[in-house]
Amino acid sequence: MISHTSLQWQSSDWQSILQTAIRDSAELLQAVGIPRGSLDAITGETAGFAVLAPRPFVARMEYGNPKDPLLIQVLALKEEIAPNAVGTTDPLEEQRFTPVPGIIHKYFGRVLLMTAGTCAVNCRYCFRRHNDYAQNILTPARLTEALTYLRSQTDITEVILSGGDPLLTSDRKLSELVAELEAIPHIQRLRIHTRLPIVIPQRITTELCQRLGQSRFQVTMVVHCNHPKELDVEVGLAMAQLKAQGITLLNQTVLLKNINNCAATLEALSTELFKIGVLPYYLHTLDPVQGAAHFAQPIGDSKQLHQILQARLPGYLVPKLVSEIPGGASKTLIY
Ligand SMILES: *Cc1c(COP(=O)(O)O)cnc(C)c1O
Ligand code: SF4
């Protein structure tokens, strides 16, 4: 029985579900039945990065468990603003690789197109917390400039919709954007990096699936799931719809202390994802972002974890352990 959260969202469209998301630590704690005093949560001002947790995601949290791995990903804790908080505010040096607003061109042959400035969930460990991605919103003028750049760079074979979360864009706008990209002959592949199918699976509409299925591109969707408890029947249905359209489904995970830094958890994540048609892609070490140091674990422990996964799982269910090292020509494999 789920008594702690409104179930009204189950029959709603994704935009309404997003509107009713929880946007305050106190409300979140109340929704999962945790007394306010038992966790060092920040209420009110959260260092510029608000609490945002959609209800379908909150409903998968364990009632009364202050250590719930889903809760800890979205609840603002005082550790974020500890005086000794280490890390930088642009750990990936993305500013350097922005030839025109809205494009990050860092690796050969593929570019990020920042399609939306915000997300449907605010993950406390995210590097996005310090970036003013609102400046990346694709206004018509910026889109024109971005498309001109893409046309001029004939090496580019893959466009990756990123953000923020690109699936916050409406189906109509996404369809128009895909059409613009399809008109550029050297682009062969379209990739969408998104956490929306996990946190609000209702976002995977029939219109979206059909549009992507009809595209001349090979389409890949990389969902972003960190823990097997993030998967439920609704997520499975969303994946099935995408798969029916021939879309390749991959997952990337961030390795997070006290959330998923455990071999059994990561093993279950891979096998549960595979049941719904998703293959593991990357297991990212945490970027050294200010305010997220309490999620970091020593690199040696991460390597050891990865070795256990490799020993226990078939090769295709082992994600690549990677770090993003500024200046690299790709993500860096960690052995
Ligand atoms: C991760 C990333 C990509 C995609 O890299 P793949 O290894 O192809 O997944 C592209 N551009 C940037 C800036 C990235 O950070
Ligand atoms: S969905 Fe991804 S980009 Fe958005 S806050 Fe979470 S980790 Fe960051």
Image (cartoon, rainbow, N blue to C red):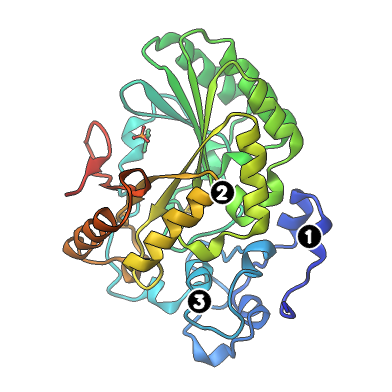
Amino acid marked by disc 3: Asp
Of the two numbered discs 1 and 3 on the same chain, state the one appearing first in sequence: 1
- Please give left or right for residue 107 compared with residue 174 in the image: left
Give the number of callouts.
3
Give the labeled residue for mark 1: 10
Label 1 to label 3: alpha-carbon separation: 22 Å
Residue 54 makes an appearance in the image: no
Horizontal and vertical percent for residue 164?
A: 53, 45
Above or below: residue 240 compared with residue 45: above
Q: Residues within 10 Å of mark 2 (few under 14, many from 20)?
A: some
The foreground one among 42 and 18 is 18
Q: Secondary structure at mark 1?
A: helix
Tell me the mark number nearer the camera, choosing from 2 and 1.
2
Q: Closer to the camera, 68 or 329?
A: 68
- The amino acid type of the residue labelled 1 equals Gln
Q: Give the residue pinned by disc 3.
A: 68
Q: Earlier in the sequence, mark 2 or mark 1?
A: 1
Q: Is mark 1 within 8 Å of ligand 2?
A: no
**Can residue 298 be seen at all in this image of the molecule?**
yes
Most foreground residue, 311 or 155: 311
Which comes sooner in the sequence, label 3 or label 2? 3
> Could you tell whether 245 is left or right of 205 in the image?
left
Within-10-Å neighbours for mark 1: few <14, some 14–19, many 20+:
few
Mark 3 within 8 Å of ligand 2, using the beta carbon: no
